[in-house]
Image (spheres, rainbow, N blue to C red):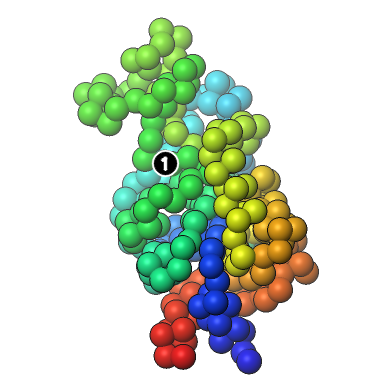
């Protein structure tokens, strides 16, 4: 049986699927990944200048503008075949989607209830209270960044998780619960370098799940995968759903 057929068979037989996605699933939508050698964001920018609380303290305007630039790219992008395939999968079998991505391409492709481990680039928070800041308020209060309406010492900040920050406990618990409960887990387009997300396949396997990785490049998780599909997500995932339909 070839790899796509095996994936289709496992998905068809699954009772609960967990799909863990990373930046690679949005690559075919034209959104740069972080760690790809030539095109990745961390090949061109230093995360410690842009994606840490200390960076924001040091130069809030620089960080604010960088996220505004990325927000514009996301707004112009469209979901690709892989995002649509994940949404379609959830219509066929109970599926929990856990994404590290802060773009909203899964949601725009029809995935509801995605667990967004690293927040959302569309959200803005108070830097002190972490309360959401309303988009209408932001539109009426320009600034790079504006002061927070929720706290005298606060600034508006992107609603994403930065290096050195903890994931919200409830979000992490939901993801870990899903990992323990699934019988099939797919890791799609993640380099598996960032924890706790990269630990979810091990949790799932520890509880008996079958694990497939879809990624053109090998990752630290590749040796432990039950199936490796070294192909772009936008080809592999729709192909598996087509084979499922035809079988
Ligand atoms: P990375 O940029 O680290 O990894 C992207 C992965 O996608 C790589 O392993 C690529 O080989 C793979 N890839 C590229 N094109 C692909 C395609 N068409 N189909 C499938 N896979 C493809 O991105 P993440 O693993 O998501 O965190 O990075 C994890 C976290 O590190 C991000 O959420 C972000 C980053 O710093 C925060 O911002 C907190």
Q: Nearer the viewer, residue 59 or 110?
A: 110
Where is residue 17, by image quadrant?
Answer: bottom right
Relative to 243, does residue 215 appear above or below in the rendering?
A: above
In this rendering, the count of numbered labels is 1
- Give the image location of residue 19, x and y in percent: 54, 61
Residue at 53% across, 26% down:
56
- Give the image location of residue 159, x and y in percent: 44, 34
Q: Is residue 134 left or right of residue 111?
A: left
Residue at 59% across, 71% down:
214
Residue at 49% across, 17% down:
128
Residue at 38% across, 35% down:
123
- Give the image location of residue 167, x and y in percent: 58, 36
Q: Which residue is mark 1?
A: 121
The answer to whether residue 184 shows anywhere in this view is yes
Locate the N terminus by quadrant: bottom right
Q: Residue reaching furthest right? A: 223
Q: Mark 1 packing: few (<14 Cα in 10 Å), some, or many (20+)?
A: some
């Amino acid at each position: 049986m070839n790899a796509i057929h095996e994936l289709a068979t496992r998905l068809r037989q699954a009772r609960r699927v967990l799909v863990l996605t990373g930046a690679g699933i949005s690559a075919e939508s034209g959104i740069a990944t972080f760690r790809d050698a030539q095109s990745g964001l961390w090949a061109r920018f230093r995360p410690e200048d842009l994606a840490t609380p200390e960076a924001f303290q040091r130069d809030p305007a620089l960080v604010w503008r960088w996220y505004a630039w990325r927000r514009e790219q996301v707004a112009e992008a469209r979901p690709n075949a892989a995002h649509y395939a994940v949404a379609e999968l959830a219509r066929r079998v109970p599926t929990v989607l856990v994404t590290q991505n802060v773009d909203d391409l899964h949601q725009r492709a029809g995935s509801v209830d995605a667990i967004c481990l690293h927040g959302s680039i569309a959200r803005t928070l108070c830097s002190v209270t972490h309360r959401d800041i309303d988009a209408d308020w932001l539109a009426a209060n320009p600034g790079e960044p504006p002061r927070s309406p929720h706290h005298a010492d606060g600034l508006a900040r992107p609603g994403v998780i930065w290096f050195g920050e903890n994931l919200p406990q409830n979000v992490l618990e939901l993801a870990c619960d899903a990992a323990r409960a699934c019988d099939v887990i797919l890791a799609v387009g993640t380099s598996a370098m960032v924890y706790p997300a990269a630990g979810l396949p091990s949790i799932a396997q520890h509880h008996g799940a079958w694990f497939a990785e879809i990624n053109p490049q090998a990752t630290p998780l590749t040796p432990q995968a039950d199936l490796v599909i070294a192909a772009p997500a936008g080809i592999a995932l729709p192909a598996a759903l087509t084979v499922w339909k035809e079988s």
